[in-house]
Amino acid sequence: MDGDRLTALESSFLAFEHPGRPVHVGAVAVFEADPLLDEHGDLRLDAIRSHVASRLGALPRLRQRLAPGWFAGDRPHWVDDPGFDVARHVQHVSLPPPGDDDAFRRLAAELHTAPLDHERPPWDIHLVTGLAGGQVGMVERAHHAIVDGVGGVDLAAVLLDLDPAGTVPVPVPEPVARPVPRPPAVPGGPASDAASPAPASPNALQLLAGAATGSVTTVLRPVADTVLRPRATARRAAAVAGAIAAVIDEGLLAPRTSLDVPAGPDRRLAWTGARLVDVKAAGKAAGATVNDVVLTAVAGGLRALLVARGEPVPHDLVLKALVPVNERAENDDHDLGNQVSAVLAPLPVGVASPVERLGLVASATRRLKGRHEADGFSAALHAADLLPMPLVRGLVRAAEHQPFVNLVVTNVPGPPVPLYLLGARMLEAVPIVPLAANLSLGAAVLSYGDALRICLTADADACPDVDVVVAGIEADLGALGAHSLEDPP
């Protein structure tokens, strides 16, 4: 896998990163404690590290680090980390007393504010002891260049087990010497010897040649695809045009609010949730999806925040959420990377009634699906792979002040069955998203078993009142659930 280049989207996540503002995704989880502790009550850290290491064969990307491109226009690429040590990536943190939920959330926020070391594979896991409830916590981080939200669930599914007894570990392949092409014999130079073994590692000239070949291939492959498949190219162009038309039709610019400010270096995390069956029932009663219910509740939380801040909230106020859309095929199991598109979903925060708001959200999302807006975004992202890295950085700088969206809301379906780590059941899982592009608030949603969790990542300075959003979300979920019981379909 040496030399795999980042896509333009993945490269943009690197360009968005600044000191004090990392761009990584992750999760917070809580496990039963007993199977993870030894007879003295200490964390079985070595056993956990060995377990994680035994599973990395299924995700070789996690043993690779980022390397810069060889040329000014070249994108970064992945190379094997010869000094990989799982102990650097799986660490232990002990919370001081009282170790309550607030302390755990603060620790998770501090970890997600700290940058990952790009001299190593950019991911890590922190096991947390000292929780007041006696459980063991986990804070997982991975750079967005490695993984998107769905890929993060795949990552957890590989590192964890489907049964308390554990499944057969995936063996980690031993490093092998990769054969490298031999240069042609030079007249007057030493004769070529086809029978002699290839060198164990390429020299600088061969690496340069490989990088050049990779760069040319990266550019020529989509160009050739464009030329040789004109119908597919025409469909992609039509999809992009359709997406642009849909965005313009819905209103090109998002309303400006106090949320639309650059994120600072500090974060606050706040989360809430509901029973998945109740959320499904609320959606079914209105002919809506779980995602529609989530967007409606998030809009209710934003409405509560703006009202509490004394900002005008007219009846026709509609904020905009960037909603990622998974593009993985069903057979792309455990495939990391970023395979997503997106839609711009309207959030009618001006509508006070959660039931009325849900109807508007469901109607809007059906309209977006009918327009195939996600296909247009996908085609645009693939076209961006033709761009050299300096232009990608230029687009990122422009996006720092984008006026098109107010926040990101990502919804990831998690495993419906329990997961285990060394026999310890995972009791709760909460997703975390980064902040970028003058957005001070983001929301991530994850289903696990019979629970749905909504986590808000907030800039600590621009959005210290994130708990108001949580209360608004809880109120809307309660109101929608009560309505579904009063008026069953």
Image: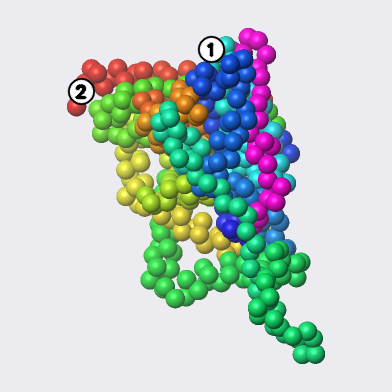
Q: Residue at x 79, y 86 (%)?
A: 189
> Is the residue marked by circle 2 packed among few (<14), some (14-19), or many (20+) residues within 10 Å?
few
Estimate the x, y position of residue 119 in percent, counting from the top left: 73, 46
Task: Measuring from the top left, give residue 246's x and y in whole percent.
Answer: 41, 51
Q: Is residue 342 above or below residue 379?
A: above
Q: Residue furthest toward the left?
A: 489
Q: Residue furthest right?
A: 188
User: Where does label 2 land, which residue?
Assistant: 488
Query: Residue at point 77% right, 90% down?
Result: 187
The amino acid sitting under disc 1 is Gly
* Residue 133 numbered tag: 1
Image quarter hosting the N terminus: bottom right
Question: Dot 2 lies on which element?
Answer: loop
Of residue 243 and residue 61, the one placed in the foreground of this image is: 61
Give the extent of the magenta segment: 77-100
Picture disc at residue 172: none
Q: Position of residue 487 (x, y in %)?
A: 21, 21
Mark 1 and mark 2 lie on one chain; the one further toward the N terminus is: 1
Residue shown at the point (39%, 65%) measured from the top left: 235
Q: Does residue 89 belong to the magenta stretch?
A: yes
Q: Is residue 63 visible?
A: yes
Q: Is residue 71 magenta?
A: no
Asked if residue 464 is positioned above or below residue 57 in the image, the reply reads above
The reply to whether residue 353 is in sight is no
> What is the spatial separation of the Cα atoms under label 1 and label 2, in whole angstroms?
38 Å
State the quadrant of the C terminus.
top left
Q: Secondary structure at mark 1?
A: loop
Q: Position of residue 112 (x, y in %)?
A: 63, 32
Q: Amino acid at mark 2?
A: Pro
Mark 1 nearby-residue class (10 Å; few <14, some 14–19, many ≥20): few
Vertical comparison of 195 with 187: above or below: above
